[in-house]
C-alpha cells in the first residue's frame, strides 16, 4: 500500500517544511519538498518513487503532517488498590490513536517475590494480539534483590531498556535508597535508564495517617497530605544518588516547583537529569480535588498542585529542564472504582484518564496560547520520548526510513472534550466541557490508516512490540 500525503506542512522537532510525504508499506520512503510556486523538488530516488504513483492520496492542504505521538507513560490494566486500571491494551491504545498517539510505552510490573521476567511475560500477554498501535515496556521493579539486579541485564537484552523505581508507596512499590542506588549501579553496567517516581512515601504516609485519624477523609486530603517538599526532597535525593552512581536518571510525572528546582539545579551543575511532566499538572489544580467526593476523579500521585505551578512547569518545558510530556494514563471509573475510597482518601485508586487528550491539550494550551512553537510541541509529544527511550529515528520523526506513523493534524479545528465522546474506557473526563483547538484528522500507524473522519479503521493485534535500544541520547546529552 502506497500513500501520498500532499500539500501539507511537515512539522518535525527541527522545524517546519512544505513537503509531500510518500509512504510505501510500513515506512516513509520519500519527502518531496514543495516550493511556494507549487512545483515539487524531489531528489532522484524520491522522483523515481513518486513516478510509481500511490494507491491513496491524502490532500493535507492547510494541515500539519506530524510524527505519530508517543505517550511514554501509560498504565493499561494496572492493578492498584484492589482494582485494575480500566483501559485494556485494546481500548486504551484505540483511544490513544484517536488522540494522534501511535506509540505507547507502558509499565510492566514485577510483583513482590516474583521475577522481573514473570512480570514482563504477564504484560506481554496483556498487549500482544490486543494493542492497535505499537507498544514498548518499561519495567517496574518492586523488589530489588541480588537476583532481580542480575535479571535487569536480561530484561535490557529483550528491548525493555528502562526501569521504574519508587520512593513512594511503602509496602507496595517502594524501594529504599540502597536498593535504588544498587539498581542505578547496575544500569551503569547494562546501559538501561532508571526512571524514578520521586515522592517521599514514608513521610507522606505519616501525614496521610494523621489527617485520616483527624477525620479528614475527603479527596482533597490526598493532595494536602503529599506536600510539595516531599516531591522536591525525593527528586533531589534520587538525582544525587544517580550522580554518585555515575548514571543518568529520568524523573517521571514531575508536578511541582520544588521538584523542578531540583532538576534545574542538577542540570545547571551538569548532571544527566531528565524529567517529564503530565498534562494534568499543566491544566488541572488542587482546586479540582476539592469538590467533596467528586474530587476523587482527580486523585493521582503526585497530586494536582496549586495553579501557580502551571507557569513554572511551562517555563521548564520552554527552557528544556523538562524534556517530555507523558500522561501517566491510569483510568478508574468514578462509579465502582474511585468509590472504593469513599470515607478514606487513602483507598481511592490513584490515576487519571488522559491518553486521548494529551496532544490536543498541549497544542491548545502550548502552541495556540503562544507558549511553545509547533516544533517544540512535536518535540515534547514524540521526538524527545523517542530519543530518550531508544526509539529514534524509527519513531518520533517524519523522515525517510522512519516507520510510517504519521498524523494529519488540523491546527484550527475546535472540539470539546467530554466523556460522552471520548474513547477511553472511563466514565468521566478530567477536562469535561473544555474546548480545545487542534485535532488529529487522519492517523497512520506503520502505513495503515487507523483513524479517519472520526472512524476507527484499525484492528486489535496490529500493534507490534517495540524492542527498544539503549538510551544513548541521555548518556550523550
Ligand atoms: N500514580 C498514579 O497516579 N497512578 C498510577 C501509579 C502512580 O504512580
Ligand atoms: Zn509513578
Ligand atoms: Zn505512572
Image (cartoon, rainbow, N blue to C red):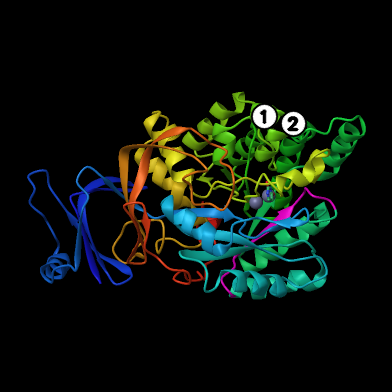
State the extent of the magenta-drawn residues as a range.
Answer: 158-170
The residue shown at (78%, 43%) is 341
Q: In which quarter of the image is the N terminus?
A: bottom left
In the depicted structure, whether residue 180 falls above or below residue 284: below
Residue carrying label 1: 286
Query: Which of pointers 2 and 1 lies earlier in the amino acid sequence?
Result: 2
Task: Look at the image and say whether residue 206 sits in the magenta stretch.
Answer: no
Q: Which of 47 and 285 is in front in this view?
A: 285
Horizontally, residue 179 falls left or right of residue 194, namely right
x then y, percent, for residue 95: 48, 54
x then y, percent, for residue 245: 71, 56
Q: Which of 245 and 374 is in front in this view?
A: 374
The residue shown at (72%, 32%) is 228
Residue carrying label 2: 220
Task: Look at the image and say whether residue 162 sits in the magenta stretch.
Answer: yes
Q: Quadrant of residue 164?
A: bottom right
Q: Which of 444 and 314 is in front in this view?
A: 444
Amino acid at each position: 500500500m502506497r500513500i501520498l500525503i500532499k500539500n501539507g506542512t511537515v512539522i518535525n522537532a527541527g522545524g517546519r517544511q512544505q513537503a509531500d510525504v510518500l509512504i510505501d508499506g510500513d515506512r516513509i520512503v520519500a519527502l518531496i519538498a514543495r516550493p511556494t510556486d507549487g512545483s515539487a523538488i524531489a531528489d532522484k530516488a524520491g522522483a523515481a518513487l513518486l513516478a510509481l504513483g500511490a494507491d491513496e492520496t491524502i490532500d493535507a492542504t492547510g494541515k500539519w503532517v506530524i510524527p505519530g505521538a508517543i505517550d511514554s507513560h501509560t498504565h493499561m490494566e494496572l492493578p492498584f488498590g484492589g482494582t485494575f486500571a480500566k483501559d485494556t491494551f485494546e481500548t486504551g491504545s484505540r483511544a490513544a490513536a484517536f488522540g494522534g498517539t501511535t506509540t505507547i510505552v507502558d509499565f510492566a510490573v514485577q510483583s513482590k517475590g516474583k521475577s522481573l521476567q514473570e512480570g514482563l511475560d504477564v504484560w506481554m500477554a496483556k498487549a500482544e494480539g490486543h494493542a492497535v498501535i505499537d507498544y514498548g515496556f518499561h519495567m517496574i521493579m518492586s523488589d530489588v534483590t541480588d537476583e532481580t539486579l542480575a535479571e535487569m541485564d536480561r530484561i535490557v537484552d529483550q528491548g525493555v531498556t528502562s526501569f521504574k523505581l519508587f520512593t513512594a508507596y511503602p509496602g507496595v512499590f517502594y524501594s529504599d535508597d540502597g536498593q535504588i542506588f544498587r539498581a542505578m549501579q547496575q544500569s551503569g553496567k547494562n546501559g538501561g535508564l532508571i526512571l524514578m517516581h520521586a515522592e517521599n512515601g514514608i513521610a507522606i504516609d505519616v501525614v496521610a495517617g494523621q489527617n485520616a485519624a483527624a477525620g479528614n477523609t475527603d479527596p482533597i486530603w490526598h493532595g494536602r497530605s503529599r506536600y510539595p517538599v516531599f516531591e522536591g526532597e525525593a527528586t533531589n535525593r534520587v538525582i544525587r544518588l544517580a550522580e554518585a552512581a555515575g548514571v543518568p536518571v529520568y524523573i517521571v510525572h514531575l508536578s511541582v516547583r520544588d521538584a523542578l528546582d531540583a532538576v534545574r539545579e542538577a542540570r545547571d551543575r551538569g548532571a544527566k537529569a531528565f524529567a517529564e511532566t503530565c498534562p494534568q499538572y499543566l491544566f488541572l489544580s488542587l482546586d479540582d480535588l476539592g469538590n467533596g467526593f467528586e474530587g476523587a476523579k482527580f486523585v493521582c500521585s503526585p497530586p494536582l498542585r496549586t495553579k501557580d505551578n502551571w507557569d513554572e512547569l511551562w517555563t521548564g518545558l520552554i527552557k528544556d529542564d523538562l524534556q517530555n510530556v507523558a500522561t501517566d494514563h491510569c483510568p478508574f471509573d468514578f462509579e465502582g472504582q474511585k468509590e472504593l475510597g469513599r470515607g478514606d482518601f487513602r483507598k481511592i485508586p490513584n490515576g487519571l484518564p488522559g491518553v486521548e487528550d494529551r496532544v490536543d491539550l498541549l497544542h491548545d494550551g502550548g502552541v495556540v496560547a503562544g507558549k511553545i512553537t509547533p516544533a517544540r510541541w512535536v518535540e515534547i509529544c514524540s521526538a524527545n520520548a523517542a530519543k530518550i527511550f531508544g526509539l529514534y529515528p524509527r519513531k518520533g520523526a517524519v523522515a525517510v526510513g522512519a516507520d510510517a506513523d504519521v498524523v494529519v493534524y488540523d491546527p484550527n479545528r475546535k472540539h470539546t472534550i467530554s466523556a460522552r465522546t471520548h474513547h477511553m474506557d472511563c466514565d468521566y473526563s478530567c477536562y469535561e466541557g473544555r474546548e480545545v483547538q487542534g485535532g488529529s484528522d487522519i492517523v497512520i500507524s506503520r502505513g495503515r490508516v487507523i483513524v479517519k473522519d472520526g472512524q476507527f479503521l484499525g484492528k486489535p493485534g496490529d500493534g507490534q512490540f517495540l524492542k527498544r535500544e539503549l538510551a544513548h541520547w541521555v548518556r550523550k546529552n
